Amino acid sequence: MARFAGLLALSAAWAAGGALAQQAPVAEASEHGYFEDLPVVLSVSRLAQPLNEVPGAVTVIDRDLIRRSGAREVAEVLRLVPGFLFTRRNGANPVATYHGALDIYGARMQVYVDGRSVYSSFYLGDTHRGLQGVVLEDIERIEVLRGSNSASYGANAFLGVVNIITRHAADSHGGMVSLTRGDKGIDDGVARVGWAAGDVNLRLTASHRRDRGLDRVHDDSLLAQAHLRADWNPRPSDEVRLNAGSMRGRFGEGARPAATNPGNIERMIEWEDVYVNASWRRDLGDGGGLALHASYERDGYADRFPYATIPTIAIDNGGIGDRMEIGFQHTLGLAVRDRLVWGIEWRRETAQSQSFFFSNATFSVNRFRGFLNYEWRPHPQVVVNAGGLYENHNIIGDSFAPRLTANLHVAADHTLRAGMTSASRAPGLYELRGDTRFFSGGVLADWTFRSSGKVKAERVLSQEVGYLGRFRSLGLTVDGRAFVERMNDRIRFSGRTGVGVPNDAVNAPGPHIHGFEYQFDWQPTTTTRILLAEAHLRAASGRADEIIEVPHRSTTLSFIQQLMRGVDLSLISHSTTPFSWSGTNNVLDTPRQLDARLAWAFAVGATRGEASVTVQAVNGGHQEYVRANRFERRAFATLRLDF
Amino acid sequence: MSPRLRRLLIAAFLCIMTYGSRAAPVSVWIALSDMGGVYAEAAEALRTEVERVYPGRIEWRIASAAQLRQTRSEPQWVVAVGGSAQRAMQEHFAEDPTPPPLLVMLVPRLAFERLADPGRVRAGQVSAVYLDQPPARQLMLAQLAFPGLRSLGILLGAESRGQAASFEKAAREQGIRLNIQVVAGDGLFGALQSLLPEVDVLLATPDPAVFNSQTVANILAAAYRRRIPMIGFSPAYTRAGALLSLYSTPTQVGTRAGEMLRQALPGLALPPPQWPREFVVGVNQDVSRSLELNLVEAQLAQQLRQKERP
């Protein structure tokens, strides 16, 4: 998936662990070691592309920062990225979105876990469940590409891309257990073992996460998962990786019947997911490389309950979805470090749900993509990226997303960037083929949705200028970006005027979002780190409800301090100006959350441990998603042992 | 004493010394561990350096150690190039009550000390120009390349663990925090896993039990996955993917050894074993770019020289 031939997933995903554990030949010191040839390990195609040459803004959150953030959810970690919002529709549905609260499923960004897209087109487009399908302790780092990126990642990389890279299996040998207990029924556990079998490195992780969610909301949740990662180097130039896993969740949903809630009763939704993901990369030398990847994932929901006020209506929101993808990428190293990356990819997603499609048939979306990017260095101080991605979607047809970006190194450690690209979000299968009818004793009681199938993809034309600067003597890195995102054809539901009259998915003019965002990462001393991530946004739209979906400002300020050897303090404050999540018509009143974490690291023999206490919402809680929901202060303690 | 005067005196001394034998040339053996390659390069540099001062006054016999052992005559000086030449020459003269002085070059300090008789070294009868770099120079380079360096990681093996003390001494003098892990048996993986999270830079040491052609790929890969650069001790390291390498070429070592031999030729004791004075700093520009560093080989080498010899 690494379109920038380097940055993404590459440096972590490329295997090379293999023979670490194997016995070195017994040898005495001699001059031979000084004159022997060594295999080229880090060739250009394997090196991470420097951030100042990436055609876009990138925030990297590493393992250390994830741990010290005290987060229990990946989505929660994304608060550290400028422009990201985090909420929970209820406690069982954490979600992160970029540039506004335009949807509650994270449908306008693309998410990869070790190169596997976890974006689901089943319903309206969704990444929130996919973001839950990775164990925080397994993550090496998260690379967030802030900005539209369909030119590299296809439709759905609409406003941004989140790349989650798990640790190389060779880097997590040994055992690890972590237990968390706290308020609100918080009960998390992780057990992991990593080992080498011959020259294959393996890691097996199992975890469960349980809590009672928000107060006064039926949202207890339990999520259990197991993941396997295997890394193998058949030859120095080749790396093979296999990931497989399974997840199972029980999520509280619904509310007590009331006048405003006639049917959505309290119940538990069951979710299951299995996946397998394989990739192979070959280094061709001179900056060239080949990569192949394939993945398959299947998930299903079970959610049956009687409509409260008319119990003869049986509601079944269940369904099964499949996603498979196969892709090929070829990087050619050219003269003066120019580089050409091209590739093709095929992706198929299917959905089967009687209640969503009023049919037992399996609906599918097939996409074929071809992409090309030329990285051109007309001058040592200039990198130009020009390219695009053509996509054929079996229902909505062809689209093309071009991109042109120039990075100018104005001085050592200071880079200016300007770019322009277009991107799209393809409608989800429900938006394309949905049909929801409710029957009572065989008689049609209501018809809430019927897609005419005419809906088109959402489009955005994005322009940006950026700056990336390092002030090494101060220990400071600054990343700033100003942008205009002209969205159009936003998909909305429209047409329902009363019972029996269904909605349709239609395209409407979208908002134009403009603004600027920046992040400061300052390490004034070796024991202190201060991070500021802030976005200032404005939405221009003909609709009042759309304008308030974009908060004028969102800020995350983190202060991470080593108090003494082994003792660590983190304080993270996240706040936004008033805004409303799409469809809620509920302006939240300046949500503000302060989290604090105190950790003590220790070692007993070869076992390393860390005991920590985290208090979320130290400042007393805030409105969450809607005004009626509150995220109350909660504390939990974690004990982690690595052996 | 001015250099010119000293040179004159030495020349006079040589004249007097060789007067009775009709100015018979001084015979020097250069025993190579292997013919050609780096050994021949170092030998040639030594010869050039000595000939520069004493043109035509030396009778050179440059051959493999095995060939020289077939020779009946005895030289006045022996230069051994490489570890196996040192071993062969020591064995060759083991029975000799008055063995000729031996100058060894192109060997790591560990290898030299393993073979050399400490008594003869103290007496100036045996000396060496090592192939490895002094710990202080290695740490200085790390500090020059990474001004904000917090901790430098070093992996040592069973044989090289004795070097820990000299690294720690140099680190104290330069105010660098070291993290030294000793690899025992097959514990390379574990040592690396506990070392890498603690350090900013990894320094490769020429202990073949730790760093060899089979392990380097994995060590480099593991370090780079954490964005930790490595400093190697040969140009092959920078080619393979180490960010920096610090080494002396066979010519630089040979020239230094030539200077030492030249000083001892008038019949003086050999100077004590020493590190090579000249060195090269290599930078892998691709890795440097990837880590967003601006390192220039010539500039680093220049700064390092200035720090060493202000």
Image (cartoon, coloured by chain):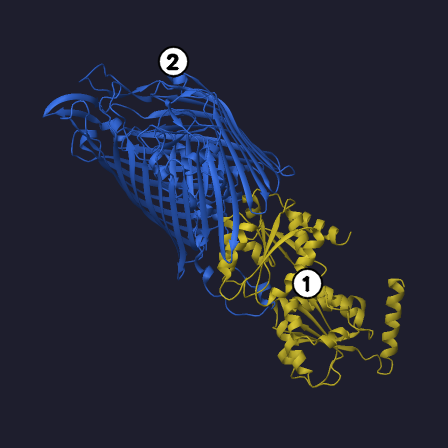
Chain colours: A blue, B yellow
Q: Which mark is residue A381?
A: none
Question: What residue lies at 68% left-to-right and 61% top-to-bottom?
Answer: B166
Q: Judge whether A146 appears above or below A14 on screen.
A: above
Q: Is residue A449 left or right of residue B19?
A: left
Question: What residue lies at 77% left-to-right and 69% top-to-bottom?
Answer: B271
Q: Judge whether A435 appears above or below A412 on screen.
A: above
Crowding near the residue tagged with mark 2, few <14, some 14–19, many ≥20 C-alpha atoms within 10 Å: few
Q: Which mark is residue B251?
A: 1
Q: Select label 1 or label 2 by which is in front.
A: 2
Q: Which amino acid lies under the numbered mark 1 shown in the image of this protein?
A: Thr
Question: What residue lies at 38% left-to-right and 18% top-to-bottom?
Answer: A546
Residue nearest the viewer, comparing B1 with A591: A591
Labels 1 and 2 positioned on one and the same chain: no
Question: Mark 1 touching mark 2, by CB under 8 A?
Answer: no
Q: Which amino acid lies under the numbered mark 2 shown in the image of this protein?
A: Gly
User: Circle 2 sits in a helix, a strand or a loop, which is it?
Assistant: loop
Spot occupied by residue B279 in the image (x, y as percentages of width and height): 68, 57
Spot occupied by residue B86 in the image (x, y as percentages of width and height): 66, 75
> How far apart are the two marked residues, 1 and 2, measured between alpha carbons?
77 Å
Residue nearest the viewer, comparing B229 with B49: B229
Residue under mark 1: which chain is it in?
A: B
Look at the image and tell me whether residue A2 can be seen.
Answer: no
Q: Judge whether A461 appears above or below B135 on screen.
A: above
Q: Is residue A308 left or right of residue B256?
A: left
Q: Is residue A447 left or right of residue B281?
A: left
Q: Is residue A237 left or right of residue B13?
A: left
User: Circle 1 sits in a helix, a strand or a loop, which is it?
Assistant: helix
Q: How many marks?
A: 2
Look at the image and tell me whether residue A381 can be seen.
Answer: yes
Spot occupied by residue B265 in the image (x, y as percentages of width and height): 80, 73
Q: Which residue is mark 2?
A: A542
